[in-house]
Amino acid sequence: MLRSFRLAPLALLILVPLLAACSRSRPEAQAKGSTNSIALTGAGATFPSVLYNRWLVVYHDHNPKVAITYAAVGSGEGVRRFIGEKITDGEKVDFGASDAAMSDEEIANADNNVLMVPVTAGCVAVAYNLTGFQGDLKLSRRAYAGIFNGEIKKWNDPLIVQTNPGAKLPDMAISPVVRQDASGTTFAFTKNLDAISERWHQQFSAAMLVKWPGNRSERRGIREWRAPLQDPTEGSDMLDTSLREKLDWIPPRSKTRKASF
């Protein structure tokens, strides 16, 4: 099993395991292999999907007889398809990817026929949509943990005001946007909350699927998840595509960056 890290806030380094069965192969791949070509299918985490798909294109350019496709369906769904229980023919995969390592129980369900390989790393940022706010929003550990555990409910909460002196913060409710499905990004973010917040540690811990407290907005999949950031009635989320989508996000302070790396 891969070990998880306890990390500084807002710069969460995570390993993204690639799940590969040591001897599992699909009939389609075997059939195509007999004509000197190979077709492989994978599915899983959305977090690294852009990188994976780029790798696969480059690999195919150098190895034209090997065709590999990857479906970004989420870490939890990737593990489910990889284990192969109650899946359709269209859901069968040769490999999966998850931001969280498989549990001992999941490995057993895959007949202990699993090889986990760390392939990349990335950061999870807190993105926000606060209409009319000028400048960069700064949140302390206590503040962003308080938002996601339901203790901090408004943008002008004293803990947020404390780290944003002089800023005009509205007396408006915060609506955290979170994933409804099993998500590796959720696991990475809640791993951080579990390390910095005693209340979170006691009530929730780190998980891919969380029963979020407070006034949250639950969305399924990455596309639904980022949509509220264009809507002024919604507030903040832990979004792994903030930079790619050019969204407002909360960067780590220099002290945090040094501690993280």
Image (cartoon, rainbow, N blue to C red):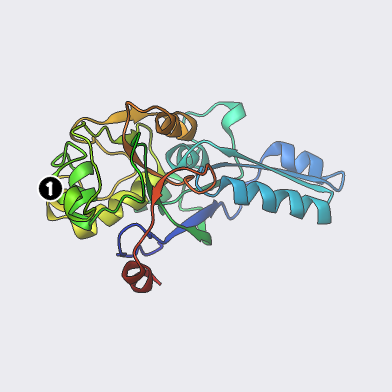
Query: On screen, 4 above or below 76?
Result: below
SS at circle 1: helix
Name the side, left or right, on which 256 lies relative to 13: left
Query: On screen, 85 above or below 193?
Result: above
Of residues 247 and 114, the one drawn nearer to the viewer in this rendering: 247
* Whole-percent x, y for residue 28 in the image: 73, 36
Name the side, left or right, on which 232 lies relative to 224: left
Of residues 67 and 111, the one drawn nearer to the viewer in this rendering: 67
Hey, which quadrant is residue 62 in on the image?
bottom right
Hey, which quadrant is residue 130 in on the image?
top left
Residue under numbered circle 1: 158
* Whole-percent x, y for residue 26 in the image: 66, 40
Q: Residue at x 42, y 44 (%)?
A: 248
Query: On screen, 219 above or below 107?
Result: above
Q: Amino acid at mark 1?
A: Pro
Count the numbered circles shown.
1
